Amino acid sequence: MTLPRIQIYDTTLRDGTQSEGFTLSSNDKIRIAQKLDDIGVAFIEGGWPGSNPKDVEFFERARDMQWKNALITAFGSTCRVKGGPEDDANIKALLDSNTPVCTIFGKTWTLHVKEVLLTTNDDNLRIIEQSVAYLKANGKRVIYDAEHFFDGYKADSSYALETLKAAVRGGAETVVLCDTNGGTLPWEVEQIIRALKPALDHPFGIHTHNDGECAVVNSLMAVREGAIQVQGTINGVGERCGNANLCSIISDLELKMGYQCLPAGKLEHLYDLSHFVVEVANITPDEHLPFVGKSAFAHKGGVHVAAMRRSPQSYQHIEPEKIGNKMRVVVSDLSGRGNLLSKAEEHGVEVEGEEVVGVLNDIKELESRGFSFEAAEASVTMMLKRQEYGYKAPFELIDFSVNVEHRQGRGIFAEATVKVKVKGELFHTAADGNGPVNAMDNALRKALVSYYPQVAKFHLSDYKVRILDSDHGTEAITRVLIDTRNDTSRWSTVGASTNIIEASWRALADSMEYGLMVAH
């Protein structure tokens, strides 16, 4: 039996922006909408027209653009109580958005009808039906979101059903069951939908929130019970604890349940879409998200990695490449030989078993002293590379010094000198900077650039410091992580010491050596 295609309704640009710390400009919205259209979602909810200038601008720009797969959708509410849709500013703004589809929400829960709208049950049914009908009469396809549906159904099942029927009478093509407060459990979703379907007999969708950590499973449960549309956001962003994560839902539906959600060949772009949204929103990605997180297929335990080297299925529930992700091996004090062998193979480093064991022992000893190699794979690669037969380091540190002082008219001033040997030639260089690490970086570059002009393209993109044993005060061990990038690659290195300058130098030297010998 061929399963129906599930409509993916993305509300990242509207419901997602209600997430604390997640903000999008009108241009950001356009860029994300284009990516959503490329991957093939069915509906893109662009915002609430009339609520703010950004959404007005988005709909004006979207109106003149060509969309290949998605229908741009405007969101709003039913008309005001004691009024009609024909003179309602919210309804007018929906029409003025010129989108082919409008989604409006209405009240399902009697608590909201009486205590929020301050109206009667009958008047709420009237504004639902009239609002949908008016939009429909003006040429719009209408989706109706039944706000607080599951809470409303548990409070008064008969009335909750009547609100859906009012939307159907008005001409809604789909009625969407919303778990607005996010507290409904999966078996409740199943039981309620099963009881509802015979009386409704109309296409329905699901919109869940994650306050009970059940948004994804509740969405999947609804699809099993016949929902044709799933509403959610990329990466699960949304108010409070977030919306249903479409990245997980799409992956589960297509890879595990046999449904089609996206056009053929588009699923493998899901990882890129997830990280694109994060990048545009300028927020830190949650790399532990299922399916699309960088750590979703990362293996750290030595036993796990040893098994993975024999069979990739041993500790992975899907092939990560199917959604555009990849398997990674993490190196730490929990690692075994397999972790380092995998890392050596990944970077084309040729080492034998004895060398690997030696590096492994070094890593375990260094981690006991405060190093952490999980986020510093370039340092691990260099430890392996230095064991490779015939390897010659591109430079050798002889010594360095750093001076930091306050100078009148300049404030804090940092100057560094480094003495390094490059291909047998000794260089003694000095440079200043806005801090000691910047000064060391500038001095080292001056020593290397004549032999290695590519260092001019190496940029320190991040510098993190962590105090590991703060109870030791100023004698505490300091861990330094440095992120470096060039035109094509990005890599991370680590150093640790009771002296922050020494820790920084070690991370900096590893970064330069990796960039010169490995990064492309």
Image (cartoon, rainbow, N blue to C red):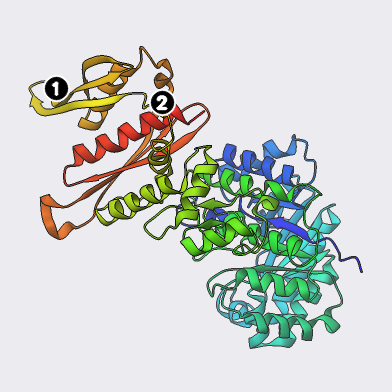
Q: Residue 292 bears which disc, if any?
A: none
Res 429 seen here: yes
Residue 368: % across, % down = 27, 57
Q: CA distance from mark 1 to mark 2?
A: 27 Å
Tell me residue 98's x, y (percent).
Answer: 76, 44
The percent position of residue 8, horizontal first and vertical second, equals 74, 57
- Please state which of residues 520 and 303 is positioned toward the viewer in this rendering: 303
Name the amino acid, label 1. Arg
**What number of labels is visible?**
2
Q: Earlier in the sequence, mark 1 or mark 2?
A: 1
Q: Nearer the viewer, mark 1 or mark 2?
A: 2
Query: Residue visible at 38% across and 41% down?
Result: 383
Can you see residue 97? no
Tag 1 and tag 2, C-beta contact below 8 Å: no
Badge 1 is on which residue? 410
Q: Residues within 10 Å of mark 1 (few under 14, many from 20)?
A: few
Instruction: Report which quarter residue 386 is drawn in.
Output: top left
Whether 47 is drawn above or below 123: the answer is: above
**At 25% across and 34% down in the image, what residue appears?**
505
**Identity of the residue drawn at 73% across and 69% down:** 127
Where is 180 relative to 515, above or below? Answer: below
Above or below, 423 against 263 in this view is above
Pointer 2 local density, CA inside 10 Å: few below 14, some 14–19, many at least 20: some
- Return the mark for residue 458: 2
Q: Can you say whether 453 is above or below 286 in the image?
A: above
Q: Is residue 1 left or right of residue 474?
A: right
Q: Nearer the viewer, residue 384 or 16?
A: 384
Image spot of residue 136 (x, y percent): 83, 58
Q: Residue furthest right?
A: 1
